[in-house]
Image: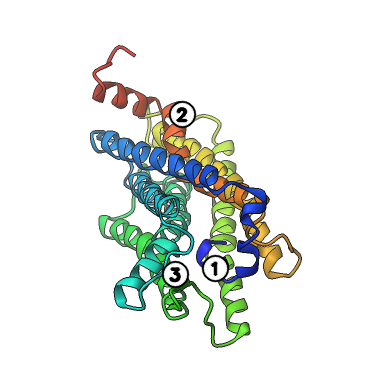
Amino acid sequence: MDSTTVVADVGSIGRFSEYWRPNYFEGAVVFLGVCGAVGNCIVLLVFSRMKTANTFVMNQAAIDATAGFWLVISYLYKLTVPEDHVFKESATGFASCLLLDGELPLWCSLNASVYGLLAITLERYVKIVLPISHHASTLSLPGLKIAFMIVVTWLWPFSFMCAFTVPFSKVWGGKCLIQTHWPSEQLREAYGTIKLLLFFVIPVLLIIAAYSHMLYVLKKRTKVVPGLQNVQSRVIPLAQVNLTKVMIVVTASFLICWIPSNVYYLLFNLSLNDLGFAHPVYYMLLCMVFLTCCINPIIYACKMKEFRAALATQCGCDGL
């Protein structure tokens, strides 16, 4: 589900004003974007000063900050540019159509967050499960693999979205038409199904399976002692267990915010949802998706003692 996929539902867009005053919705989204961009930049600053900062968590904060930035840009554009704005039929006009009206960078960033969470899950799985099965005290991913995984979390969503957006979009008659010029209806339907599978269903199933196994492993090891008597007791350091618990909360909040909108989109693709994409229900679900870019800093502040301490140090409030 994303705006680049549903703009083709032109008939429903005109009904927007029947339900919502656009300025309220767009103003709320800009607020969420500012919170997301600022909050995650603070997270990056704090983590960069922490010796124990997790590279994958920092990558997720960078993705969310980018999504927040594009939320602000995209919806300030919608607030300030009239609906009857005429796009030039030129490279510049097409670029503004894709970047601003079509929200392409925004949805690339939001979809990248799915794979950012998947990368975190795989890293947590290595830290929690594999050390036990291999009877090693510590096991980590080599730096090259970490860099590769981080690059993939960014490059894969951007490549996929651009490949299926740019060729099938155009400026025509001064209008920005996003993903409306498909060679066939079958290809459009296939794209919707494949995208739902690749950017939600499959990653979510992998994440749920991995965390379920991790919880099972942690439950079996009822006694986790950090850096104590013997090698076996150091198989899972307590810090790794705590970080995993925090990431379970982060993942759960992500699923709560994303599942409703994806179910809505799936029902639409199956012709079981006739509400369209200008109904207030859709916009409420959209707000839930946007909320994911600003909720993680709150979770870190509430659940990570080390993060709170580092933040207090940065603010000159060591006594808090």
Q: Quadrant location of the N terminus? A: bottom right
Query: What residue does disc 3 label?
Result: 161
**Rounded to the nearest whole Å, what is the CA distance between mark 1 and mark 3?**
10 Å
Q: Residue at the spot x=44%, y=50% of the render? A: 79
Q: Which amino acid does label 2 sit on?
A: Lys
- Nearer the viewer's eye, disc 1 or disc 3? 1
**Measured from the top left, where is residue 282 in percent x and y?**
64, 53
Give the colouring mode of the picture: rainbow
Q: Residue furthest right?
A: 272
Q: Which of marks 2 and 3 is nearer the N terminus?
A: 3
Horizontal side of 135 relative to 276 (left or right) equals left
SS type, badge 2: helix
Query: What residue does disc 2 label?
Result: 303
Residues 10 and 105: in front is 10
Q: Quadrant location of the C terminus? A: top left
Q: Is residue 232 visible?
A: no
Residues 229 and 292: in front is 292
Q: Earlier in the sequence, mark 1 or mark 3?
A: 1
Question: How many numbered marks are there?
Answer: 3
Q: Residue at the spot x=31%, y=40% of the render? A: 41
Q: Which amino acid does label 1 sit on?
A: Thr
Query: What residue does disc 1 label?
Result: 5
Callout 2 crowding tier (Cα within 10 Å): few <14, some 14–19, many ≥20 = some
Callout 3 crowding tier (Cα within 10 Å): few <14, some 14–19, many ≥20 = some
Q: Residue at the spot x=25%, y=22% of the render? A: 313
**Rounded to the nearest whole Å, what is the CA distance between mark 1 and mark 2?**
36 Å
**Measured from the top left, where is residue 115 in percent x and y?**
45, 58
**Rounded to the nearest whole Å, what is the CA distance between mark 2 and mark 3?**
34 Å
